[in-house]
Amino acid sequence: MHTLSKNQRIIFDIIDKSPEPMKAYSILFNVQKKGIKAPLQVYRALDKLVEIGKIHKIESRNAFIACQNSSCQVSKATAFSICESCEKVTEINNSSLSKYLSNFKDKAGMKYSKYNLEFFGLCKKCTTK
Amino acid sequence: MHTLSKNQRIIFDIIDKSPEPMKAYSILFNVQKKGIKAPLQVYRALDKLVEIGKIHKIESRNAFIACQNSSCQVSKATAFSICESCEKVTEINNSSLSKYLSNFKDKAGMKYSKYNLEFFGLCKKCTTK
DNA sequence: AATTTAAATGTTATAATATAACACTATGTA
DNA sequence: TACATAGTGTTATATTATAACATTTAAATT
């Protein structure tokens, strides 16, 4: 198991505590009191945390969330639901979906090693508003 | 059917001719001889073209490609394969996949109006290198 | 324990991506 | 014609991300 470095720990903890995806500069602002001063310090930790699967990047939002799925060691098969009204993001953990996508092959015969899926819609709360 | 404005036409044409996804500032550079001088002119056209489904944004690459699928009127169900070596991007048009994803419902009962899926791997050419 | 190697850090500068705000022009429609 | 809507042009600026280099820490190897 991977041990997080000091900066990685600080940045993971703040993302993990956040109820919503966090953007890099918002993370930076929040960790300045802990001595992390420069964007690069944040981006380096983010890169590593993504690489080891502790966090995921929500590509359509340029934001990061902690992995909700304890079995997710690496970020090679990710799926999220995103509410377009309140911007709540949830990681989808559905074995039928992941099985279907992991085995998917397109006409060109390309074999995929990774995928990222983002669903958009309205969450329950926002639907009834 | 939608008629493209002057700037939309110019910007669509250059993306449509490109064999690979184009980035906004690369588009800007390429259309400056046609009188389009500012980033905002490019981004406005891109926004509209995405909205009407003539182009798609590859979120993981911040780049744009023309829709390969003549039936794709709006960008509400998109899937792409991306080669991590040569960066070639192909739009996937697979009715089994789109049916599966369009009907997908997660545990939270959220109904999705849109999705975007990006597969990553090595294309045939890059596999045999 | 000393050596060596890889990983992480700190820092300054800058590149790349994207939007705000405002004035104006063209186009479609009542 | 007049009214509304969409598109344009422009300047300035916000946001997201990386390059380059010097140094320090941690881990693996001898």
Image: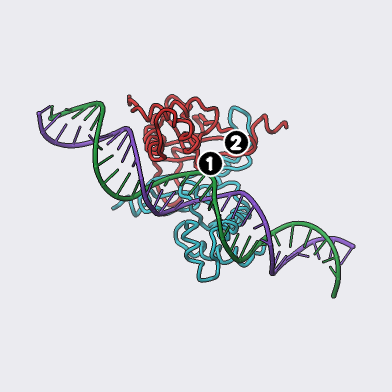
Chain colours: A cyan, B red, C green, D purple
Q: Residue D29 at x, y = what percent?
A: 85, 60
Element assignment for label 2: loop
Which residue sits at x=67%, y=29%? Answer: B125
Residue B2 sits in quarter: top left
Q: Chain of mark 2?
A: B
Q: Chain of mark 1?
A: B
Q: Which residue is mark 2?
A: B87
Left or right, A117 with respect to C28, comes to: right
Which of the two residues, B39 or B44, is positioned nearer the viewer here?
Answer: B39
Does the CB distance between marks 1 and 2 fall below 8 Å? yes
Count the numbered circles shown.
2
Three-letter amino acid code at the position of disc 2: Glu
Is residue B7 in view?
yes
Left or right, A82 with respect to A56, comes to: left
Identify the disc placed on residue B61. 1
Three-letter amino acid code at the position of disc 1: Arg
Which residue sits at x=69%, y=33%? Answer: B127
On-image quarter of the N terminus of chain A: bottom right
Which of the two residues, A96 or B111, is positioned nearer the viewer here?
Answer: B111
* Crowd around label 1: few <14 · some 14–19 · many ≥20 (10 Å): few
